[in-house]
Image (cartoon, rainbow, N blue to C red):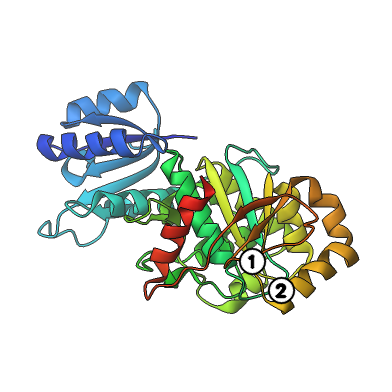
Amino acid sequence: MRIKLLIATSDVGYTEHLSGVLSEQYADSFEVCVCSNTEHLRDMLTSHRYDAALLEASLAGGTDLRPIHMPLILWAEDDCIAGPPDGLGKIRTYQRISSIVGQVLESFARVSSDGHSTLSKKARISAFWSPAGGVGTTTAALAFAAYKVTEEKQVLYLNLESFSSTPLYFSESGKSISAAFEMLENQEGSVTTLMRGIRRQDNGSGIAYFCHPDNFDDMNILSVEDSAALITACCDITDELVIDLSCICNRRIWKVFELADNIFIVTDKTISAQIKLTQFISQHNVFERVKTKAALIANKGAQIDRPPVDVAVSLPFAESADESEIYKTLSAFFK
């Protein structure tokens, strides 16, 4: 769903710049309308309703704002506004537009709802998992994500590890994904809209991602139903969803397997990884249910004798002081 957004300010140059960037770079999130004076604003509100609005205080004063579901006041640092008029929220002008977008989406998420409870999938889901830790599951997942970016896909990386390794690869300057967990727990607001607002994009790779949880418990208490709702929200905002999973195999992992289009099981040449992979294949009934969409990734130069499923790709051993350079290098092997 796109948010119908009204921008009303007398600063015509700023309005044109802001609306132009939103229409060009955030067309999947906003349908933008603009006006520059009080009379025009009142005429527009008489004939139309809007999901949200960014309003200059001088234009909004004395205007009936009831046709706007979520009005917000635009203000500059030298505006001397003691508080938002009529208790309205406010957003500062002349900051980075990506920050404005995030604030609008986060605010709108709190006053709206998703309106669906089952998977309404837009994205293709690829889950990366291993029965053994330390085999390079995250590196393989990010290499695959980087490869998909080269196909001109919108790619979203979702890290569901018990302890997130996201800070090792991406900047952590944004809001934590814990905000989404809190909304899921409270069962109010639009998780999809919130996910749009808190996602970040890595300039080097083009991969979109979320900042790691505030603490371990936030991820640990995520229920099976919450996991499905989180994936639903992510699928609605991207073309390709790449999910990075812990090496445990519980009901939450099973649910991800069920929703995934592809399951990439990562292994390497160590004896422990081979033993655990053999045990998962021979002793766990989950494998029988998912093997038709499962494939192996032989990482770090591993050679797999008599693989139980197709080997999707063999990745060589790569080493670098910069972890992000490793997955970018390995992305070429998915072609």
Q: Is residue 53 left or right of residue 109?
A: left
Within-10-Å neighbours for mark 2: few <14, some 14–19, many 20+: some
Q: Amino acid at mark 2?
A: Ala
Q: Is residue 77 above or below residue 271?
A: above
Residue on which the image places disc 2? 273
- Is residue 86 or residue 145 the one in the foreground? 145
Amino acid type indicated by mark 1: Ala
Q: Are marks 2 and 1 in contact (CB under 8 Å)?
A: yes
Picture residue at 47% right of the left edge, 68% below the top = 318
> CA separation, marks 2 and 1?
10 Å
Residue 173 pos. (x, y %)? 34, 67
Res. 286 mark: none
Task: Read off the residue under disc 1.
Answer: 302
Query: Considering the numbered disc 2 on the image, is that residue within a helix, a strand or a loop?
Result: helix
Q: Is residue 177 visible?
A: yes
Identify the residue shown where x is 10% and y is 36%.
Answer: 13
Closer-to-camera residue (160/67):
160
- Observer able to see residue 194: no
N-terminal-most mark, 2 or 1:
2
